[in-house]
Image (tube, rainbow, N blue to C red):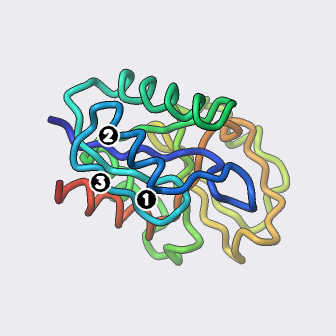
Amino acid sequence: MTSYIALLRAVNVGGTGKLPMTELTAMCQQAGFAKVKTYIASGNVVFQSKLPEAKVKAALETKLATYAGKPVGVAVRTAAEMAAVLAANPFPEAATNRTVAIFLDEAPPANALEAATGQQDEEIRLGLREIYVHYGQGMADSRLKIPAAKNGTARNMNTIAKLAEMANAL
């Protein structure tokens, strides 16, 4: 069995995409996932499955679409991949609550940084299937727009570290 982390896009953020974590847990169990655990209410879940990543993603997206009545994006990583995202953080000295990885389904385009607009003091770097951003003064007043990240979902380094730890402990 492989340990996975699923990151749901736009769940329980700013009053949109209401999804109780008990419902998410039940969906994962119905999909045949084992040792299911959620972390904070923003759509983070760790579990084990015999299925390959693409089938895990498809199964969860199908369950979520049925529940929400619309597509809900899901990024999936193995426990090892999540640990690697944390280790590859290009801003290790920066505040972990102001540094995020935006999780994508595939590698970001080579021109992702050039296409970004509204950049002020933010620093941006490309990862394997992530875009890392350090928000120097925080996210609240940022005007940064990264077109390549439109369908991604961001988690700060604190959350990434906790999810990697949880998945590793399954």
Residue 154 seen in the current view: yes
Write the residue at 78% across / 49% down.
145
Write the residue at 42% across / 39% down.
27
The numbered dot on residue 89 is 1
Query: Residue 67 placed where, x, y %?
Result: 58, 36
Helix, strand or loop under label 3: helix
Query: Residue 139 placed where, x, y %?
Result: 72, 68
Above-or-below relation of 158 to 123: below
Quadrant the C terminus occupies? bottom left
User: In 3D space, how far apart are the residues under numbered discs 2 and 1 (Cα atoms)?
Assistant: 32 Å
Residue 106 seen in the current view: no
Q: Earlier in the sequence, mark 1 or mark 3?
A: 3
Query: Residue 70 placed where, x, y %?
Result: 69, 30
User: Which picture quadrant has residue 78?
Assistant: top left
Which residue is labeled 2 in the image?
29
Quadrant the N terminus occupies? top left
